[in-house]
Amino acid sequence: MTRHPERIGRVRSVLGLVLTTGGLLTIISGVTFILQSGGYLGPESSFMVRNAEWTGYGVLITIVGILITVAGRALRR
């Protein structure tokens, strides 16, 4: 079986771009959760507003987003 380095490089680049984009969107979602749970963003009344549980979810989502973004950037190198 012959390997095609240019094809592998292209696949890694595309996968890296997809992961980086997905990771950044995940970070934005996590920060949105944090801001909304702190009462800084969104409606005045919601189950998320001033709810520490949702702040924790936001932090976890943000961390996962950072990990996904780092993995995506590593693939693009």
Image: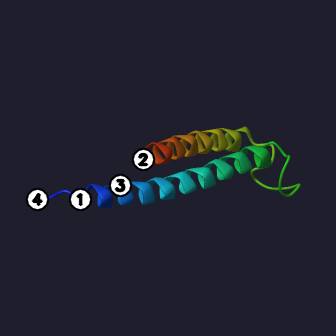
Name the residue tied to disc 4: 1
Q: Which residue is mark 1?
A: 4
Give above or below for 64 relative to 47.
above
33 vs 11: above or below: above
In this picture, residue 64 sits left or right of residue 34: left
**Pointer 2 residue:** 75
Mark toward the viewer: 1 or 2:
1
Rendered residue at 43%/55% (across/down): 13
Q: Who comes first in sequence, dot 3 or dot 1?
A: 1
Instruction: Find the distance from the CA under tag 2 to the CA under tag 3.
Output: 9 Å
- Tell me the residue at 78%/49% (across/down): 36
Upstream in sequence: badge 2 or badge 4:
4
Residue lying furthest left? 1
Which amino acid does the dot numbered 4 rest on?
Met
Image quadrant occupied by the N terminus:
bottom left
| Residue nearest the viewer, comparing 71 with 33 | 71
3 relative to 56 in the view: left or right: left
